[in-house]
Image: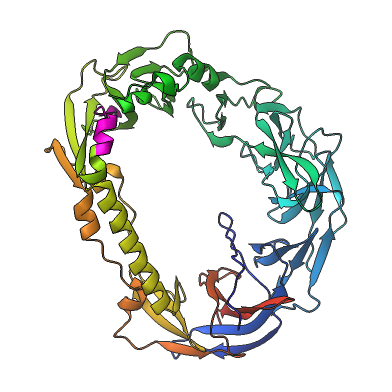
Amino acid sequence: MNRISHKLTFSLAIYTALIFQTAHAAELDASGLFYQEQEFHIPANAESMILADMNGNGLNDIVVPVDDKIRIYFHNETGFDFETGFDEIQFPGEAVGWDISTAADDNTSVIVALIDGREVVSWQVGNGNIHDAETLKSGLSGFISRGVNRLHFSQDINNDGNRDLIIPGAGQLNLYISDGSGGFEDSIAVQSTVRIRSNLNSNELERRTGQAIRIPSMDLRDVNNDELPDLISRSDERLDVFLANDTDTSYFPREASYSLDIEEIESRLGEFDIDNLDFSNLTGVLALTHEEILDDVDGDNIDDLLLREGGKVSLYSGTKQGMDFEQPRQVLRSGGNVLSTFLYDENEDELKDLWLWRVEPISVGDIFLWLALSGSISIEAFVYPNEGERFSRRPARKLNIKLKFPSVIRLATSVREITEVARENQIQDSSLSVTANLDDNLQREDLLVMINNRIDIFLNSIEPEADKDLFLGSLGYSRQRDDYEIDIKEILDNVSIQNNPHLEAVADREASFSITLNNNMESGDIIPAKLNRDSYDDVFIFSGQDSSHIRGLLLLSSEN
């Protein structure tokens, strides 16, 4: 059998999946776990599979983009019918951005599409069919690239339960907030850069141009403590904050309540000039860097702005009405090469203190020396206590961190050796494993192992992975300690490339039960997902692919 080459992706809480045709029920073990086994196959040209409850029956259906169509396989109380139990949407237009959105009047999902940047249409879904298209918004002047692509343009921006629209345009995004009655308010323009890219088709010698849209990062949270979520838009060019107002004609103002011009900051700092580079202090280029942190500094639950420009740190006060950039509340200046800043409550007084990180000068001579010999870099962290309205003018603590490393040659050799060992172990370990929750025990995870023509299942065999420590935690930070050392060579020497740790955890155990696979399913992939109303994972086992289909087996959990 061919090994699966398609990589299926998960989107947020919606899982990627595939389709199946015949079914029979089987009790997998004496403890009462009951799963329905179904063989499945989908078209080989399917781009992705998304699980979503499209008709509101509490069961996840399977949404499959295939070329210029969207196919929906319906999930009912008896499972799926993959021969005839689906319906399709044929998208019109040459440029289509589609999305899955929540209907305005209930919890069902709908398919929405932006057609050629001009029109937004939606398709509601019934129990076994897709209803006719309805126009949500027309007369738009948006832009999207050619082809059919998932575009997350339908979102509930203001958390009122109604779907809003984010339409990409020339140099901006246009936000259309739902008025709650099927229409939309006037658009709010948010700056976005549209870049032109061109490529050359060497076969046809035809020059083609296209546009790519760079959408700014958007965050929705209450920044001025009025219990209304505000809109924060970040791009490489600017930071915009739109303060919400539920008594105004528009939930968000047409223009940003306050903005920070990042391009102007970068212009003020200057551009990198190699001709004027100080070769005795290469880290001096950090003077050209900047950071913007929007967070509550003084404890009033209103976000303030911390702006670092090189070694200059400015604190601007946030109010319920906005932020005044004319006069900062405080300005701190630091000499040396400032690497970064962040906010962290070091003295545990429930106010975030300012941490300023500085790195020692590094010369060209240092770099040449490090090529053959070991070296070290000194990093300093200065902690400025939060005094409420502002930070202390002088740091209360100084942390010293020494980063030791071997020669560049030795470092490259060590990394290459580790990579080779990892590759050998990967070749030797042909077993495929994945963790899932197949029973009522939520304290430990279950392990599924595909080996040869069999799935071995080890119940409650894997401890959940602990959350990764923050940087200070990984450093071993303590309030009683000011000096730290990180030895890269020691870390490399102690690196142990092991086989699959999950397999090692069950090496001496017998499987709780096993499933013998049909059709010689001896290679592929395993993906847990949730399809029905119970709390157990369902499991897709992908086994093979040919020119027409991707095939596998589904284990569908049952409460019977």
Q: Nearer the viewer, residue 301 or 406?
A: 406
- Identify the image quadrant of the N terminus: bottom right
User: Left or right: where does residue 286 sit relative to residue 411?
Assistant: right
Q: Position of residue 475 (x, y in %)?
A: 23, 45
Q: How many marks?
A: 0
Color theme of the render? rainbow
Q: Image point 75% across, 78% down: which residue? A: 81
Q: Which residues are magenta?
A: 350-368
Q: Nearer the viewer, residue 262 or 430?
A: 430
Asked if residue 367 is among those painted magenta in the image, a careful observer would answer yes
Q: Image point 34% across, 60% down: which residue? A: 416
Asked if residue 50 is among those painted magenta in the image, a careful observer would answer no
Q: In the image, is residue 265 above or below residue 215?
A: above
Q: State the image quarter where residue 193 is shown.
A: top right
**Residue lying furthest top:** 327
Res 438 seen here: yes
Q: Nearer the viewer, residue 402 or 92?
A: 402
Q: State the image quarter where residue 230 is shown.
A: top right
Q: State the image quarter where residue 503 is shown.
A: bottom left
Q: In the image, is residue 76 above or below residue 479?
A: below
- Identify the image quadrant of the C terminus: bottom right
Q: Position of residue 458 (x, y in %)?
A: 39, 81
Q: Position of residue 460 (x, y in %)?
A: 36, 76
Q: Nearer the viewer, residue 285 or 549?
A: 285
Q: Image point 39% across, 69% down: which residue? A: 423
Q: Position of residue 219 (x, y in %)?
A: 54, 36
Res 441 seen here: no
